[in-house]
Image (tube, helix red, strand yellow):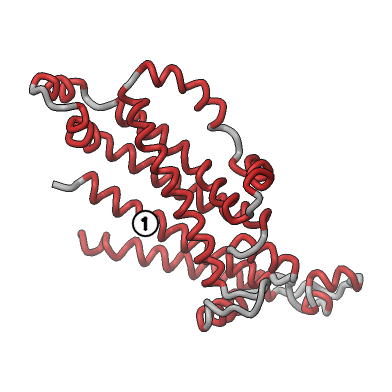
Amino acid sequence: MKTERVWLAPVLSALFFAVFVGIWHLATVKPVGEVVVDPEYAALIGAAAATGGQSAMPGPGDVASTIWQHLRDPFYDRGTNDKGIGTQLVYSIGRVLTGFALAALVAIPLGFVIGMSPLVYKALDPFIQILKPISPLAWMPLALYTIKDSNISAVFVIFICSLWPMLVNTAFGVASVRKDWLNVARTLEVPRLRTAFRVILPAAAPTLMTGMRISIGIAWLVIVAAEMLVGGTGIGYFVWNEWNNLSITNIITAILFIGLVGMVLDSLLAQLTRAVTYKE
């Protein structure tokens, strides 16, 4: 029974994928009929649609061929607007990890302080509630005006969007530590710093790690939009540049890579969460 369950999920996933690709293929090869197409519109939707024979949307074969071309040489550099998709992803991942790490350095210690001190929580809660709902991209114009560097501004936006989930979850996890454990530590006259590392941190680790997983997911979402605004190099700029070039196939390819990288980042945090939470 267990063996059947192990194989069931991959088989179903492969089946769903095959059905999706089949529907996609049928939708893109279906004739659209004899239509009269305006020349300017034809230039936008492509020569295939202009002939009335095929759909303007690329099929799975076209996308697979484009993915293979990108994988053959992912890190080429032929100028400002012509870099490999691997290079674009490296720039984006670097910005995300930098902003995420800076947010962790601020959010985790501050979350500990807020969670351990009801007074500090009441004092800072109004500021958190006002700043937390603000879209990270709303900070971009201010960052560009003050920092005057598009790359650092993008990192700042990632810092902002990563900060709040980690801060709130850390504070909640620390505040939720069982009072019995803290009372035992006080009875044994354990120093506060040692209590924080040996009692509070292990107890709050699951909630803290949940905040980090949420933060990395939001950061990867935001970097694509941020790079569309600031330009330069990055997967978000790559998508926008390919739209300007009317290359729908490259856009779909980039979307797939964005999803794969997001899945890898979340999986890494999930494994770290299990290692921290279930470590004996």
User: Residue 228, percent across and down?
Assistant: 66, 57
Residue 118 or residue 21, whichever sits in front: 118
The image quarter in which residue 249 lies: bottom right
Residue indicated by mark 1: 267
Residue 20 or residue 145, whichever sits in front: 145
Secondary structure category for the residue under label 1: helix
Identity, as a three-letter code, of the amino acid under mark 1: Ser
Q: Going 79% across and 70% down the picture, which residue do you hit?
A: 45
Q: Going 68% across and 76% down the picture, which residue do you hit?
A: 29
Residue 31 or residue 43, whichever sits in front: 43
User: Residue 238, percent across and down?
Assistant: 63, 66
User: Residue 110, percent across and down?
Assistant: 38, 32
The image quarter in which residue 36 lies: bottom right
Q: Residue furthest left?
A: 188
Number of marks in the image?
A: 1
Quadrant where the image shows the N terminus = bottom left
The image quarter in which residue 32 lies: bottom right
Q: Going 70% across and 73% down the picture, which residue do you hit?
A: 30
State whether residue 52 is above or below residue 155. Answer: below
User: Residue 269, percent across and down?
Assistant: 35, 52
State whether residue 219 is above or below residue 59. Answer: above
Q: Is residue 26 left or right of residue 32?
A: left
Q: Going 33% across and 39% down the picture, which residue do you hit?
A: 208
State whether residue 62 is above or below residue 165. Answer: below
Residue 267 or residue 74, whichever sits in front: 74
